Amino acid sequence: MSAAQGVTVVAYLGDEPAAARAFCESLAALSAQPRHEVVLIADSAPRLEPLLAALDGDVTVLRTGRHLGAAAALASAGERARGRKVVLVARPIVFGPSWLAALLAPLDEDTVLAAVPPGARSTLADSPAVALDAATYAALASAFEVDDDLVIAELLLRVAAKGRVAVADARAASFPAPRSLLRAAVGGEPELSVVIPTLDAASERAQRCLRAVQRTLEQPHEIVVVDNGAPAQGFSAPVNAGLRAARGQYVVMINDDVEPLPGWWPPLREALDNGATVVFPDTVGGFRRADFAAWCFALKRATVEELAVAPGEFFDPELRVWYQDTDLLLRLAACGRPPRLVPAARVRHGLSETVESDDPELSAWVRARRELDRAHFERKHPGVVLRPFTIARNHGDG
C-alpha cells in the first residue's frame, strides 16, 4: 500500500467473538478501492484467538498484554497507521462493500476534517466509526479520558473545534450480540444470575458496571439490579433480596463500582464445578485482596441456601453495612471451605465507592451504622479480634 495514497482502518474488536467475526467478514468483502490496510486491536481478548488465527495474514493484529479499553487502545494504535487517511472503528459493525469509499468521500472537501456514517444522533454519542486525515488523527487522538462508548464522540468534538464534521453516505450497523447468547429462552433458566446492589441505578458508575457485565458475558444470564437508595438499607439487605430473586444455576454478586474484564466468568464457573464453594476473581490495576474480595464473588444457587444464616438471608441482616465478608469468611472456615481466588478471572474495582456519598445525612448514617455493626459482630464472634486491615495495592494489570 502506498503511504501517500492509502487508507488505514484501525478497529477495536472488543471481546464478543460473534460480533468480531461479522465485522471481519465485512472487511473481507470490502471493495479493493480505495487501497487500504487493516489494523485490528485484540485487547486482552483470548476468546478471539481462534478467529485471529484464521485470518490470512493480510491484516495487522495488535495484541495488548493487558486490558486497555477502546479509548486507550485506539489512541495508541495510530503510530501503526501508514495511510494518509485513517478510519477508526470503536466497536465491531457490519457494512457493505462500498462502505469505505463512501465514508471517505467527504474528506475530499477542503473544509471537512472528519466524516461519520449516517444515523448518529446530534450529540454524536453513538457514532461507531470516523474517517479523518492521518495528520488530524495524530494531532487530536491522544489521551482520551472518556468511557469507551464515547471515544468517537470525544474525538469528533475535538475535530469540530478545528473544522467541519460531515455525515457520509455510508451506512453501517452496530452488530448486537445474538439475543440467544445473552438471555435464556422465555420460561427457561439462565445459567447465571448477576446481582448488583446500588445506591443509584441511574448513576454512571452503575451503568458502567452493567455495560461491562453485558459486554463480557456470552452465556444465558439475567441481571438483578437492587436499587437501595430510598432509603438506604445498607449492603446485606439488597444483596439478600437480589439472591432471593436469582433464578440462575450460578449466582454472582458484584458491586456497582466493579467492571468485569473479558473472560472473567468461565474460570469462576470451572472452579465452582471443580468443588469450590465460593470463588472470587482477581482485582487488577488497583486495590486487591487475596483472602476474599466481597465486591465480586460467585457461588452455586444451592450454596446460597446451604450457607444462609436464616431462610432467605445469605448475609447476616444484622450486619447492615460492614463486616459481612468477615462473618462469611468465618462461617466458611468453620466448615473447612474457604473462598478461592481464581487468578484467571479479573475485574477492576473502585474501592469503597459504593458507600461514598455526597449526602451528609447518608454519610452520617453509614458512620453510625459501622459502630452498630461492629458491636453485633463482636457479640457474634467474641473470640475474634478485629484489626485494621491494610489493602495491598496492585500496581500492575496482569
Image (cartoon, grey):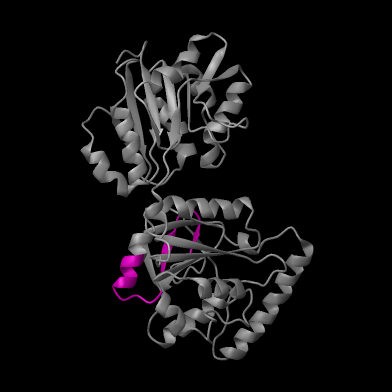
Residue 83 sits in which quadrant? top left
Quarter holding the N terminus is top left
Query: Residue 370 location, x and y as percent?
Result: 67, 75
Relative height, residue 308 to residue 395 (above, below): below
Relative height, residue 61 to residue 364 (above, below): above
Residue 220 sits in which quadrant? bottom left
Residue lying at 45% horizontally and 26% vertically, measured from the top left: 171
Would you say 292 lies left or right of 353 here? left
Query: What residue range appears in magenta?
Result: 269-288
Would you say 344 lies left or right of 290 here? left
Would you say 96 lies left or right of 358 here? left
Residue lying at 64% horizontally and 54% vertically, measured from the top left: 202
Taking the image as drawn, is residue 395 in sight? no
155 is within the stretch colored magenta:
no
Front position in the image: 118 or 24: 118
> Which residue is at the far right?
361
> Which residue is at the far front?
187
Front position in the image: 3 or 252: 252
Taking the image as drawn, is residue 7 in sight? yes
Residue lying at 41% horizontally and 63% vertically, measured from the top left: 281
Query: Residue 85 location, x and y as percent?
Result: 43, 17
Residue lying at 54% horizontally and 36% vertically, measured from the top left: 126
Front position in the image: 363 or 106: 106
